Image (cartoon, grey):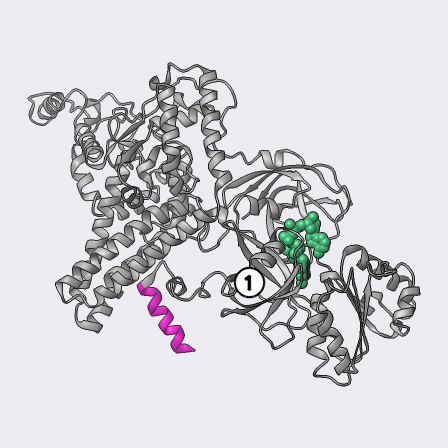
């Protein structure tokens, strides 16, 4: 029984986000790229596609050996570190064990986990190193993180209001985000976020805000809560119960083992936090409005990724320890190319930026971190300074006779629909 | 056992999200949580283009029945490829496959496999196996189709003096004939086995003609009284099936029962290909524009999706994948089918328009 072609609406009813326009231009081209014509943008897109195709064509056994070697080193370090902590009564053992676990966790989260979960190694078809099977040493479950990160952040990169990574619903990280007194706490929140970054991300990946506004169903939230609770329990048990207990039994060094695992987690968290803040918050990195993505072509999409990201310069070791997020620009242009190949495409991307008169933001880690922190502090205060707000507040609280108290919100003329939470605070995580 | 289980749980607590096997894998290449593996213990040259590869499988392997096949995965330039190979070793022995180089994977196996290499494996399967009760047998094989039958012969002949097996094997020349000397020695040593080689390219050589009974009557006059097994190229098997159908339909209740067939490649309808379309692998978040003659399985693998598969020819159903939307074309029949939620065999179906798969 042969039937004719399927009714087309069956698949068309399931559009995939976001479909880029093949020609034309966005409603508004970002100011940084406003000097480029449609034809130039299309040509830029073709040039970047060609870079990508070259890497795809040469992917092979060498790359496979690379990721397997990194995984082997990481697992050996993790194992050695944990065994060392079992005997951590001696201070030297405590320090060595903590160092090894810290490095193992950093490698696992960054060069391995983040990149495997991006599908950078899926082409090997190895179920042991695959985005659909990988689970990482991080509180946020791979599945929920992949959604907020791969689907949302990488699609809406730096579009204020869309990319929740702009501030993670917590920090005010862009001038476009309306100021509220809550933003005064920016530096404090960021300081607390730093050592507990993985918990912050786990909370953020639950997308409570999307649930509150109805974009995310209660069933989805329940599922994510269940996943996260289970994952968090496992992670917590490993580092803060099983390892100290084993150390206690083996050499009565439970307390030191606990100190070791806690410190290792903090070091990894602070490092990840620093690297990630360098990705989209240093000076020179642009954010975008919704008109700038309306009608975006492939070339425009590439431009947004390039001018919305910042690199970290440094040695090959630095690139490894940042999971090649030091090549944030290349990563955003080609999120599924194997991370070990970003270094090789970087000069070409940079050359393209120069030739088309686009900025290519990069700098050493301390400078980029400083700039990101400076932004956190700068945006804690409203654009017109604290003065007007303080006057209003004082007036409202202690002022004479005024019958109506101004609602706090009136201070900044934000449209009332925009809630603080809707503004991506830390929106750019990786 | 319970102790191992308890130990494993404790280790998991300390290693999560890794599994104990992930860490054991640092020292034992066979340890894996997700993927059965084997280590190559011996490679023997059979003919210029074929090798027998012996391997020791890791935990989780099931001993094979004579005639069964297993899925073998090989890494070629960093990418894993899977094909099926019949196990040529006798029942009870360590498994071995005998591969003839004809394409990508077989050539890699034949030319590159060394001692100590790792093969990725799936457990043996297939029902091309010896009958449960003793009866006279006729084996009809051609080329590499001898492999599963070789396992049967090696299993049956030395152990059962009462067996009665006639093996007709067709090969181009003596030097290209698999297991040539071993078969002659076995036939010499055990009266239970009669071997007839048929060389198509030697002397007056021509193909064994199965479109009518003459050749068969000459080589094995009592063929009608034997349970037959056939394995070889598609046209060889098609001719055998037609012959049994026409000659024995009256006598046997079911010609299919009198003749068992093992195919190494699917029978595709010429020109079954249609338009093709965009295939979306939803869970893997991949899309591939796929031509109408390319199976969904190949398309998925090319996109880096880990696709379940087995025989890759439409018999084992290991590749079943839920169809979310769209229609697919059966490459064997040309039939266009597909309902939402239907499990489709990705190895023999190609997209007929846009297709969404739940994988
Ligand atoms: C149940 C089963 C058991 C099998 N057992 C064996 C075995 O014991 N030994 C063995 O060598 N192979 C066996 N095969 C075949 C094997 O799985 C592969 O198909 C074969 O090795 C070719 O794979 P490749 O990647 O080398 O060729 P590909 O590169 O995939 O194909 C190369 C070309 O050869 C054609 N081709 C594929 N298979 C055959 C064939 N059998 N004869 C002629 N042309 C073919 C293809 O259509 C293609 O055009 C078996 C297959 C099945 C399904
Ligand atoms: S792989 Fe065996 S039926 Fe598809």
Residue A426 at least partly seen: no
The residue tagged 1 is B121
Q: Position of residue B148 (x, y in %)?
A: 70, 67
| Chain to which mark 1 belongs | B
Q: Is residue A74 above or below residue A312?
A: below
Q: Position of residue B18 (x, y in %)?
A: 37, 60
Q: Residue at x 47, y 21 (%)?
A: A43
**Of helix, strand and loop, which mostly describes the magenta segment?**
helix
Q: Position of residue A130 (x, y in %)?
A: 45, 50
Looking at the rendering, in which quadrant would you find the N terminus of chain A?
A: top right
Residue with the most extreme front position: B203
- Please tell me which residue lies in front, B258 or A390: B258
Q: Position of residue A6 (x, y in %)?
A: 68, 37
Residue with the most extreme bottom position: B161
The quarter of the image that holds ligand 1 is bottom right
Q: Is residue A134 above or below residue B325?
A: below
């Amino acid at each position: 029984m042969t039937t004719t072609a399927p009714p087309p609406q069956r698949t068309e009813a399931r559009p995939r986000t976001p479909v880029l326009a093949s020609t034309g231009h966005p409603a508004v081209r970002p100011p940084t790229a406003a000097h480029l014509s449609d034809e130039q943008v299309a040509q830029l897109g073709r040039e970047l596609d060609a870079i990508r195709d070259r890497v795809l064509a040469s992917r092979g056994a060498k790359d496979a050996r690379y990721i397997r070697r990194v995984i082997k080193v990481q697992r050996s370090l993790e194992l050695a570190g944990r065994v060392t902590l079992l005997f951590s009564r001696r201070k030297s053992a405590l320090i060595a064990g903590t160092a090894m676990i810290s490095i193992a966790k950093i490698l696992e989260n960054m060069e391995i986990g983040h990149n495997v979960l991006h599908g950078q190694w899926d082409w090997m078809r190895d179920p042991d190193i695959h985005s659909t099977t990988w689970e990482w040493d991080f509180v946020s479950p791979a599945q929920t993180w992949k959604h907020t990160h791969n689907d949302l952040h990488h699609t809406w990169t730096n579009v204020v209001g869309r990319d929740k990574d702009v501030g993670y619903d917590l920090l005010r990280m862009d001038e476009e985000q309306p100021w509220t007194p809550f933003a005064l706490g920016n530096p404090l929140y960021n300081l607390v976020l730093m050592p507990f970054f993985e918990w912050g991300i786990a909370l953020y990946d639950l997308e409570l805000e999307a649930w509150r506004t109805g974009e995310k169903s209660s069933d989805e939230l329940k599922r994510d809560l269940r996943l996260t609770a289970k994952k968090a329990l496992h992670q917590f048990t490993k580092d803060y119960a099983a390892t100290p207990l084993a150390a206690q039994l083996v050499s009565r060094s439970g307390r030191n083992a606990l100190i070791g695992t806690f410190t290792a987690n903090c070091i990894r968290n602070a490092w990840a936090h620093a690297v990630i803040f360098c990705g989209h918050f240093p000076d020179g990195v642009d954010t975008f409005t919704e008109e700038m993505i309306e009608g975006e072509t492939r070339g425009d999409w590439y431009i947004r990724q390039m001018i919305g990201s910042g690199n970290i310069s440094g040695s090959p070791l630095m690139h490894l320890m940042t999971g090649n997020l030091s090549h944030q620009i290349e990563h955003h242009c080609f999120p599924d190319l194997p991370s070990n190949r970003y270094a090789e495409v970087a000069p070409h991307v940079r050359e393209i930026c120069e030739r088309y008169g686009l900025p290519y933001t990069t700098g050493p880690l301390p400078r980029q971190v400083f700039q990101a922190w400076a932004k956190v502090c700068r945006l804690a205060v409203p654009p017109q300074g604290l003065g007007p707000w303080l006057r209003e507040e004082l007036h409202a609280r202690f002022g004479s006779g005024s019958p109506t108290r101004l609602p706090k919100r009136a201070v900044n003329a934000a449209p009332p629909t925009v809630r603080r939470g809707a503004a991506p605070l830390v929106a750019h995580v990786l | 056992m319970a102790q191992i289980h308890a130990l494993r749980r404790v280790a998991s607590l300390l290693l999560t999200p890794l599994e104990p096997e992930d860490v054991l894998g640092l020292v034992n290449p066979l340890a894996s949580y997700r993927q059965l593996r084997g280590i190559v213990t011996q490679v023997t040259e059979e003919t210029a283009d074929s090798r027998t590869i012996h391997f020791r499988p890791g935990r989780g392997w099931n001993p094979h029945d004579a005639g069964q096949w297993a899925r073998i995965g090989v890494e070629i330039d960093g990418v894993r490829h899977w094909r099926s190979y019949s196990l040529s070793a006798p029942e009870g022995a360590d498994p071995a496959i005998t591969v003839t180089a004809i394409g990508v994977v077989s050539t890699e196996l034949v030319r590159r496999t060394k001692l100590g290499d790792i093969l990725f494996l799936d457990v043996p399967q297939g029902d091309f196996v010896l009958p449960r009760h003793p009866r006279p047998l006729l084996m009809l094989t051609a080329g590499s189709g001898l492999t599963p039958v070789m396992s049967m012969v090696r299993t049956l002949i030395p152990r059962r003096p009462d067996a009665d097996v006639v093996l007709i094997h067709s090969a181009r020349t003596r030097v290209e004939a698999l297991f040539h000397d071993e078969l002659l020695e076995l036939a010499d040593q055990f009266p239970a086995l009669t071997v007839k080689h048929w060389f198509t390219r030697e002397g007056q050589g021509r193909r064994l003609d199965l479109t009518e009974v003459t050749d068969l009557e000459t080589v094995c006059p009592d063929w009608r009284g034997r349970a037959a097994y056939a394995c070889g190229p598609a046209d060889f098997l098609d001719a055998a099936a037609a012959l049994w159908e026409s000659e024995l339909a009256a006598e046997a209740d079911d010609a299919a029962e009198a003749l068992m067939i093992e195919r190494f490649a699917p029978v595709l309808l010429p020109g079954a290909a249609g338009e093709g379309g965009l295939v979306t692998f939803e869970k893997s978040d991949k899309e591939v524009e796929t031509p109408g003659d390319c199976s969904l399985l190949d398309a998925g693998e090319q996109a880096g999706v880990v696709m379940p598969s087995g025989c890759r020819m439409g018999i084992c159903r290991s590749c079943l994948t839920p169809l979310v939307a769209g229609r697919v074309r059966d490459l064997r029949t040309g039939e266009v089918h597909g309902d939402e939620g239907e499990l489709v065999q990705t190895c023999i179906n190609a997209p007929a328009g846009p297709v969404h798969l739940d994988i």
